[in-house]
Structures are given as structure tokens and as C-alpha cells.
Image: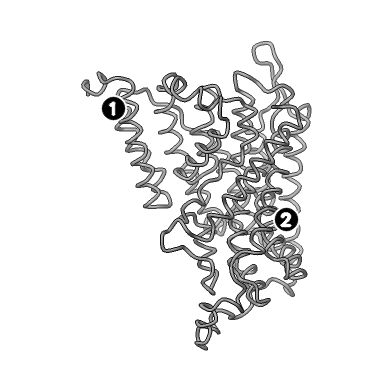
Amino acid sequence: MEFLTNLSNGTQFALQLIIVLICLFYGAKKGGIALGMLGGIGLVLIVFGFSVKPGNPATDVIFTILAVVVASATLQASGGLDVMLQIAEKILRKNPKYVSILAPFVTSTLTILCGTGHVVYTVLPIVYDIAIKNGIRPERPMAASSIAAQLGIIASPVSVAVVTLTAFLLNANHHLENFNGYTDLLKITIPSTYIGVLAIGIFSWFRGKDLDKDPEFQERIKDPEFKNYVYGDSTTLLGKKLPMIQWVAMWIFLAAIALVALLGYYSDLRPAWEVKGVMKPLGMTQVIQIFMLLTGSLILICCKTDASKIGKNEIFRSGMIAMVAVFGISWLANTMFSVHTPMIKEALGAVVTDHPWTYAVMLLLISKLVNSQAAALVAFVPLALGIGVSPAIILAFAPACYGYYILPTYPSDLAAIQFDRSGTTHIGRFVINHSFIIPGLIGVIVSCIAGYIITGLFGYL
């Protein structure tokens, strides 16, 4: 289409951006796997309509998602995840009054260990049961738990977002002095994430009316049938003697995570090869992929896991959807932005340089559009580096890649609403005024501030 290629660069960029946004909004509306597939429509229009050379899909990210999801799904199929949940439940039920603070720490820690926020589905019924049986407004720990679980992704040694961001920072033209990658990133994101989770818990402890002072709730439970539905039967793993083989599965998984972290910290432990006269160790992307596949294999063999259950559980299904979404969206974003980087740098470079916080805002909004932290990083970080954003700013504001709580469309948020039978965890009349928006903003903003301070203390800023 020659008339399109004859348009000015600015006009072409505007039209292509509209195409991308339409694909994103429609894909997000359809939900699930549609977000990734809609990227195909955008690619056809941009590549064939505007003769733009296709960019590169984020294959490293996609393969890492695949490896981590397979390992985590195998853990769930083996029953090893039930052991983690039983330990978590013991902690929560011993301190029911503090469930609004402890539950977010439990869910974020599970995410950090497993590399996926989808483990929260199995915790939410337990959190609800503890809250409602102790007269605590369920919205407080339920919304906080969902937000904290996703916030933990950027602090996980086996998450795709961490590996992706590490690779971008290491390959940046202006390399951060004394930043050696993987574990240096986690030194920033783990403490900043937990500080954000603490802020969420403190806010949640006081939010909303107590159930005995909530006239709407008290009116509803006058109906015996509704009251029985709200208080229902207890959901618990306590008292269940889990087979030793399930404990073995959990320890295999945790040992693999510890080994990956060790290899990340001590690069000398990794095999190295000569590249253009320089010895380069095996990259952490490949390390995680190799050891996650190994972990799944060991659990499968040593714990006599039924392989047919792996592809049927929630972690596997959610992970495959995320993989397709990253494939389509990252390819589309890379194709469009790579050709227009010089123009964007001229238009936005000075603004982002003078006001670094605008980088965090833009990353937050992109995360909402693509509903994935890894996809948001893949789509925006290369562009940000290209227009002159300092790698130190990108490191400091890493938690800003979590923005898909802005609208309550993410599965974990919807699950929290579903599991809260009291109705206190809700979507408001205007959609944007839902139970997750304030905890989400508090968690991300506080984590970014903490990340900025910690990055400065390590001498990167």
C-alpha cells in the first residue's frame, strides 16, 4: 500500500499506534489467549500495510515462561504445593487477628518461590475462611493477598520478568557500573517488594467498616440462607497428613531455586565459552530454563507424579495463556517501536530524562494494556533505553511493571471476588472504584520509592 508508506513518519506512527491500541483493548476485552492472537492482526496491518520489517518475538521470555510453568505445574500435580500451603495456613491460623498483614506476605512469598502469581488461587479460600470466622472484613486480606501475589513476581529468582529485565540491563549501551546482573537486581527488588507488601498490609488492616458495624452486611445476613452461605464450611489443609513424597517434591523445587540463585551470584560456577576472544559464562536465561526442566523431570520421576495431571491444572493453563500473550504482544510492540525509536527519542527523551518518574507511569500503563509484567518489560524497556532513560532508573522503578490491577480484569483479582462470599471484595459501580485499586497503587508506589532509595544506597544512581 504505497499511499501509507508515503505518509510522514509522525502520521505513520500515529496510525500504527492506533492499530496497536485497538488490538490491545479488544484483546483485553476478550480476555485469555485472545490478547496474544490479536497481535497477529496488528502485525499483518503494520508489516504488509506499512512495509515495516518484522521485529523479533521475545523467544527467550517465551521459553523461560514455558520452563518455569512446567516446573511449577509439576509441583502442583505432585502435591508439593499443598505442603507449602499447609505451612502457610499454619502461620495464618496461629495469628488470625493479623491476617490482613500476614496473608499478603504469605502470597507474595509463595510467588517469589514459585515464579508465578497464580499460586494465589489455592490460598484465597483459606484467607477468606480465617477472616470471616474471626469477624474480620474479608476484603482486607483478600484484596491485599491478590495484589501482593502479583507484586512478588519482580522479586522472584525464577520469574520471567526478573530474567528479562536483567538481560536488558546487562546489554544496555550505558552499562551500570558494578551491576553484574541477576542477583544484583534481586538485591533491589526483594526488599523493595516486601516494603511495598508491608504498606499494603498496614493500609488493609484499617480499610472499610468492621463487619459488625457494616449496616449493609448486617442486613444481608439476616437472611439465614445467605448467612449460612457466607460462613459456610471451613476450608483447611490442617490435620491432613500429607505423604512424605509430597514433601520430597517441595524440597526438590526449593533446592532448584536455591541452586539457580547460587549460580546467578557466582558466575564462575557456570560453564563458559570463548566469544570473540572473551570468555562468557552461560546466561541466566538458559540456566533457569535448564534447571526448571530438570526440576520438573526430577519431581516427575522421584515422586511418581501422574504426568497427565500436569497439563490440566490451573498453573499450567494460566502459564500457557501468558506465553501466547507475550508472543503476540511483544512481537507487535517490537515491530512498531523499533522503527520509530529515533522519532520517539526526539519527542520524549528530554521529558523522561528531566522527570524520571514518567518512565514508571508509562511502564505501569503499558503493563495494564498487556496484562503481563514480562510483556510490559519486553515492550517498553528497549524503547526506554533507546531514548536515553538511565538503566539505574529502570532498575529502581522495576515494580512499576505491575499495573494490571488498575481495572479488575486479571484472573487473580476476579478469583478473590469470587471466593469472598461476603461480597465485601467487589467491583464498584464505576468499575475503577474496586477493591484492588488502592492496595495496588500503594504497593507499587511504595515499592518504587523503596527501590529508588535502595538503588541509591547501592551506588547505582
The residue tagged 2 is 250
Residue 326 in view: yes
Above or below for 162 versus 84: above
Q: In which quarter of the image is the C terminus?
A: top right
**Image position, residue 378 (x, y; %):** 52, 34
Q: In this view, does 163 lie above or below 441?
A: above
How was the colour assigned to the protein in this rendering? one colour
Q: Nearer the viewer, residue 333 or 224?
A: 224
Q: Residue 276 placed where, x, y %?
A: 64, 12
Question: Which residue is at the front of the view, 188 or 47?
Answer: 188
Residue drawn at x 34%, y 27% is 13
| Mark 1 element type | helix
Q: Which residue lies at the image location 67% right of the left edge and 52% below the top edge?
A: 197
Residue 271 figure quarter = top right
Q: Residue at x 48, y 33 (%)?
A: 379
Picture coordinates of residue 209 (x, y %)?
59, 71
Q: For the N terminus, which image quadrant?
A: top left
Quarter of the image where one finds residue 162? top right
Instruction: Give the image location of residue 230, x and y in percent.
Output: 55, 79
The amino acid beneath tag 1 is Phe
* Amino acid on which the number 2 mark rests in the picture: Met
Query: Which residue does the image show at 52% across and 38% down from the upper left?
Result: 361
- Residue on which the image places disc 1: 48
Q: Residue 115 carries which label?
A: none
Q: Categorize mark 2 by other alpha carbons within 10 Å: few (<14), some (14-19), many (20+).
A: many
Q: Residue furthest top?
A: 277
